[in-house]
Image (spheres, rainbow, N blue to C red):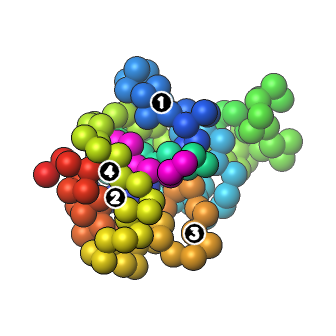
Amino acid sequence: MVAYWLMKSEPHVYPWEQLVEDGETHWDGVRNYQARNIMRDDMKIGDLVLFYHSNTKPPHVAGIARVCREGYADFTAQDPESNYFDAKATPENPRWMMVDIEPVEAMVEIVTLPDMRENPRLEGMPLLAKGSRLSVQPVPAEYFDEVRKMGGLE
């Protein structure tokens, strides 16, 4: 059964358009244990992802992606030249994980955070909770479907 997720990326770091151009990418640099555990334990090939642009005005969902490789060691943690280097990460204990994703479809219209907050059908969506800063988070199916509709995909 397909599960649904939201993954945040800052558009100046890795935008939706870059994922489309690349065809797929590894989701590296996640340094939060809860998000790591989701990628390591819960995300499966075929799961669908709301690709969310954070730290922009307005924050928004730009497209739908799909998990195409399940969790594996984030090699950037062991690269001293990487911005995501972690001196405690080793091949035996990699500490951090990542998944690969591929683009599925762009939103016809971006779905902004303010528009999501105004939609009563999204009440209770984890993204909209006060203090929700997790970069990888679950999205219940009914919220995923509603965001797709808001983006002009149904």
Q: Which mark is residue 64?
A: none
Residues packed near mark 1 inside 10 Å, few (<14), some (14 to 19) or many (20 plus): some
The residue under label 2 is 4
Residue 72 in sight from this viewpoint? no
The residue carrying pointer 4 sits among few (fewer than 14), some (14 to 19) or many (20 or more) residues within 10 Å by Cα, namely some
Q: Which of disc 4 and disc 1 is earlier in sequence?
A: 1
Determine the CA span between mark 3 and mark 1.
25 Å
N-term mark: 3 or 1:
1
Query: Which of 152/92 is in front?
Result: 152
Asked if the residues shown at circle 2 and circle 4 are in contact, with their CB atoms under 8 angstroms apart, the answer is yes
Q: Is residue 60 magenta?
A: yes
Q: Nearer the viewer, residue 8 or 95?
A: 8
Q: Nearer the viewer, residue 140 or 46?
A: 140
Side (left or right) of 54 relative to 122: right
Horizontal and vertical percent position of residue 20: 37, 26
Tell me the magenta residue range. Answer: 57-63
Residue picked out by circle 1: 25
Q: Earlier in the sequence, mark 4 or mark 3?
A: 4
SS at mark 3?
A: loop
Q: Position of residue 70 (x, y in %)?
A: 44, 44
Q: Is residue 50 left or right of residue 148?
A: right
For the point 38% across and 65% down, which residue is it? 116
Q: Which residue is mark 4?
A: 47
